[in-house]
Amino acid sequence: MGQVLGGDSVVTAAGADHVRKRRQLQPAFRHAEISRYVDLMRDQATQTTTDWKPGRVIDVRETMTKMSLDVLAATVFASSLDEQAFQQLQRHLSTVLNGAGSRIMLPDWAERLPLPANRRFNTSRAAVRAIITDAVDGLRASEHNTGDMLSQLLRAEDETTGQPVTAHQVCSEILTLAVAGTETTGSVLSWILHELSRNPETDQRLQTELSDVLEDRPVTFEDLPRLTFLRNVITEALRLHHTGWLVTRRTLTPIRLGHWDIPADTELAYCQHALHRDPTLFPDPLRFDPDRWLDESWKTSLPDGAFLPFGAGKHKCIGDHFAMTEIATALTTITRSWRLTPAPDQKVRPIARATVRPSTLLMTASPRP
Ligand code: HEM
C-alpha cells in the first residue's frame, strides 16, 4: 500500500509518525467542515442523475463509485484548480483507483512487468502528483485560502520541525483519501439501492420519512439528525454489506487473545464482513432489517468490537462522519426523484476486490410520481 500511495501517508504510518499525520489531516474532517460539504454532495448527486431517462438501465455500482470520486474531488480540491486541471486530475485519479486494488494485493514484482495496465497506472499516478504539486506551489505562492481540503492541508505544520507539510505528502494524502473514500462509499450506496429495490416496504417507509421531514425542500445538513429511519437503513447496510474483508494489525507486545497466546510482531487480520454476520451477535443475520437498530437495549448489550463499520483504535476511519453524510445526502437526493428496479435475470452476489462489492448491479430507473 505504501508503494501505491507514496509511503508517507497517514494510512501506512505507525506510532508517533501516524499521530502527527493524523493531526494534520483532522481539521479537514471537523463537524463544521463536513456541514459545508453537504451542498457539494447534493449537487454531485443531482448531477449524477441528470441524464437518467425513464426505462434507462443504470450500472449502479459504477455510477455510485464515480459519484463518490466526484464528491471527493469537489470537496478536496475543486476550488484550488482551474477547470481543465480539475478534470484531468479526476480522470487520472479514476485510473489510479481502478488499479489500486490489485496493486495492493499483488507482490511487488508484478507491478514492474511491462504490461499496459501497469503503464496506465504509472502514467496516471505521475500525472496526479504533477497536477497536485503545481496546485500546491500556486497556492503557497498566492497564500490564498480556497476553503477546500487541499487548502486546509497546506496550512498544517509538522509538529516536530514546525515546517509545512511537503508537497509529496500532500499528494500521498490525497491519493489515500481517494483510495479509502471512494469505492467504500460507492459500494455501500450500491448495496442500499439494491436492498431498497428488494424491500418495497422499506423503500416506502423511507420515502414517507423524507416527505414528512423535508416536504419539498432539498436536504440540508441540519435535516440529517431528524432522518432516523434513513440512518438505520445506512447502519444496517454497513452491518450486512460491510465493504471490509480484511483489516490487519501487528502485535507490538505478546498478548493473550481468547484461548491463544500471540507473540510480539505477529501479523493479525480480522474480517468485518464475517463479524457482522455472526448469528450470536446479530439474530437472523442475513436479513436486511433496519429496525434492529431501533432497540436501544439490544444496541447497548452488544459487546465492544461487535460492530465495527469504521474500524477501531488509532487507525479508525477518519472519514466516518464524511461518509455517513455523503451516503445520507446522496440517497435522499437520488431516491426522492428516482426508483431503481433490478434488471431481469440478474444474480447479484458479493465479490471481494479492494472492497466487498456487488459483482454487477444493473437497475432500471423510473421517475417517482
Ligand atoms: C462507507 C464508507 C467507508 C467505510 C466503510 C470505511 C471504513 C474504514 C475502515 C474500517 C478503516 C480502518 C482500517 C483499519 O483499522 O486499519 C478506515 C480507515 C480510513 N478511512 Fe475510511 N471508510 C469509509 C469512507 C471513508 C472516506 C469517505 C474517507 C475520506 C474521505 C476515508 C478515509 C479513511 C482514512 C484516511 C483511513 C486511514 C486512517 C488511519 O490510518 O489513521 N474513509 N476506513
Image: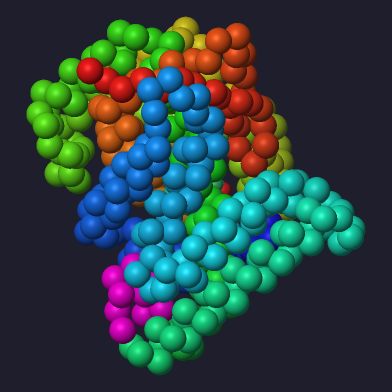
Residue 146 visible to the viewer:
yes
Residue 11 visible to the viewer:
no
Please, which residue is most extreme toward the bottom here?
A: 141
Left or right: 150 with respect to 367?
Answer: right
Q: Up-down: is 217 above or below 106? A: above
Tell me, what colour scheme is on the image? rainbow
Q: Looking at the picture, tell me which residue is in the foreground, 15 or 220.
A: 220
Residue at (38% x, 23% y) in the render: 54
Give the image location of residue 355, x and y in percent: 60, 37
Task: Give the quadrant of residue 37.
Answer: bottom left
Is residue 262 magenta-colored? no
For the C terminus, which image quadrant? Answer: top left
For the N terminus, which image quadrant? Answer: bottom right
Is residue 148 magenta-colored? yes
Give the mark count: 0
Give the image location of residue 261, x and y in percent: 70, 37
Give the image location of residue 297, x and y in percent: 27, 18
User: Which segment did they paint magenta?
Assistant: 144-156
Residue at (38% x, 59% y) in the render: 74
Left or right: 110 with respect to 299?
Answer: right
Left or right: 86 with respect to 209?
Answer: right
Residue at (49% x, 28% y) in the render: 58
Q: Up-down: is 32 above or below 296? A: below
Q: Looking at the picture, tell me which residue is in the foreground, 280 or 82.
A: 82
Residue at (19% x, 39% y) in the render: 219
Give the image location of residue 288, x and y in percent: 43, 14
Q: Up-down: is 343 above or below 68? A: above
